[in-house]
Amino acid sequence: MRYSLIFHAPEPGVDGPAPTEEDFQEMMRLMDDFGQALTSAGVFVAWEMLAPHSETKTVTRRTGEVVIEDGPFAAAKEALAGVVVIDVPDIEAALTWAEKFPGTSYGTIEIRPAATSFVDGTWTRPGDGPARSGDCPSRPDQSS
């Protein structure tokens, strides 16, 4: 089953002092070690660390008209900093990996199971195989 390890952390230099170059390099080494461990264990799917919220754009179409704005959708104490997707047997395995994530020394990991996944051109649901196209509530072709 796929789980997303959703990483929230203060923005360096915005929500507190920026890390020193030495601290940054050490965290990069720890993150690399974590990624290598995920890969070696055969559970790694994807990992994205995100640019600062100052580079964020939001797109909405609440009234039928597209609105594009600068900045994140919602203000939060800790910004969305990254997402790691893993494929493990159960929540206990996902929690075990989350406990090893180096960023928990300064941020928070939220563990969320996948409801549906788009893999190799097909929507799938955990345990059910391919999902019907109508099973995905946020399909891009829906008008709302």
Image: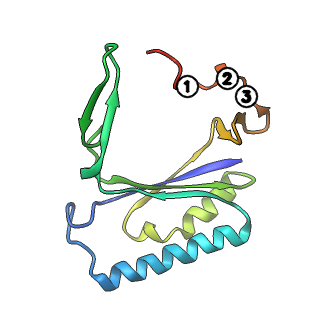
Q: Of the residues shown, which amino acid type is indicated by label 2?
A: Ser
Query: Tag 2 or tag 1, which sits nearer the N-term?
Result: 2
Residue 114: x and y, percent?
Answer: 62, 41
* SS at mark 3 in the image: loop
Q: Which mark is residue 131?
A: 3
**Mark 1 crowdedness (10 Å alpha carbons): few <14, some 14-19, many ≥20:** few
**Mark 3 crowdedness (10 Å alpha carbons): few <14, some 14-19, many ≥20:** some
Residue 42: image quadrant is bottom right
Q: Which residue is mark 1?
A: 139
Residue 29: x and y, percent?
Answer: 48, 80
Q: Of the residues shown, which amino acid type is indicated by label 3?
A: Ala
User: Which residue is depicted at the point 21% across and 61% down?
Assistant: 15
Tags 1 and 2 in contact by the CB under 8 Å rule? yes
User: Which residue is depicted at the point 29% across and 42% down?
Assistant: 72
Locate residue 35 relative to residue 72 in the image: left or right: right
Q: Which residue is mark 2?
A: 133
